[in-house]
């Protein structure tokens, strides 16, 4: 597909040139319920953007996990798997 007003040469780029992809934290159930705010699948599936005050989950996290899995404003979070096919690939913004 090409937009009619676009006549220039086409350049292909991999998304990885512009974005960092990483899987999220998958903590043991014993660490859930206390600690730092934890964005869950339900937060990603909710309508609207995700903001700090709307995050209900908590998790105990190591310093390394905090460094590797913290999110920043504007990050796009998407669901790579689900119990239902229609939820795979759903995304939300923090």
Image (cartoon, helix red, strand yellow):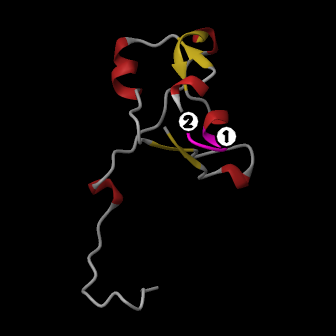
**Image marks 2 and 1: residues in contact by CB distance under 8 Å:** yes
Residue that extends furthest to the right in the rendered view of this protein:
84
Picture coordinates of residue 34, whole percent (x, y): 59, 8
Give the residues in magenta.
44-50
Within 10 angstroms of label 2, few (less than 14), some, or many (20 or more) residues? many
Within 10 angstroms of label 1, few (less than 14), some, or many (20 or more) residues? few
CA gap, disc 2 to disc 1? 8 Å
* Residue indicated by mark 2: 50
Q: Is residue 79 magenta?
A: no
Q: Residue at x 64, y 14 (%)?
A: 29
Q: Residue at x 58, y 44 (%)?
A: 79
Q: Main secondary structure of the magenta part?
A: loop
Is 43 left or right of 11, judged from the image as shown?
right
Q: Residue at x 52, y 26 (%)?
A: 52
Q: Residue at x 53, y 18 (%)?
A: 37
Is 45 left or right of 75, judged from the image as shown?
right
Picture coordinates of residue 18, whole percent (x, y): 29, 54
Picture coordinates of residue 24, whole percent (x, y): 49, 33
Front residue of 62 and 93:
93
Query: Residue 46 — which label?
Result: 1
Q: Which quadrant would residue 41 be assigned to in this image?
A: top right
């Amino acid at each position: 597909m090409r937009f009619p007003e676009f006549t220039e040469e086409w350049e292909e780029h991999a998304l990885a040139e512009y974005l960092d992809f990483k899987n999220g934290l998958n903590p043991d159930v014993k660490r859930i319920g206390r600690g730092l705010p934890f964005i869950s699948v339900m937060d990603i599936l909710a309508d609207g953007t995700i903001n700090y005050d709307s995050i209900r989950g908590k998790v105990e996290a190591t310093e390394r996990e905090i460094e590797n899995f913290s999110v920043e404003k504007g990050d796009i979070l998407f669901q790579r798997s689900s119990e239902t096919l229609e939820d795979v690939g759903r995304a939300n913004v923090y």
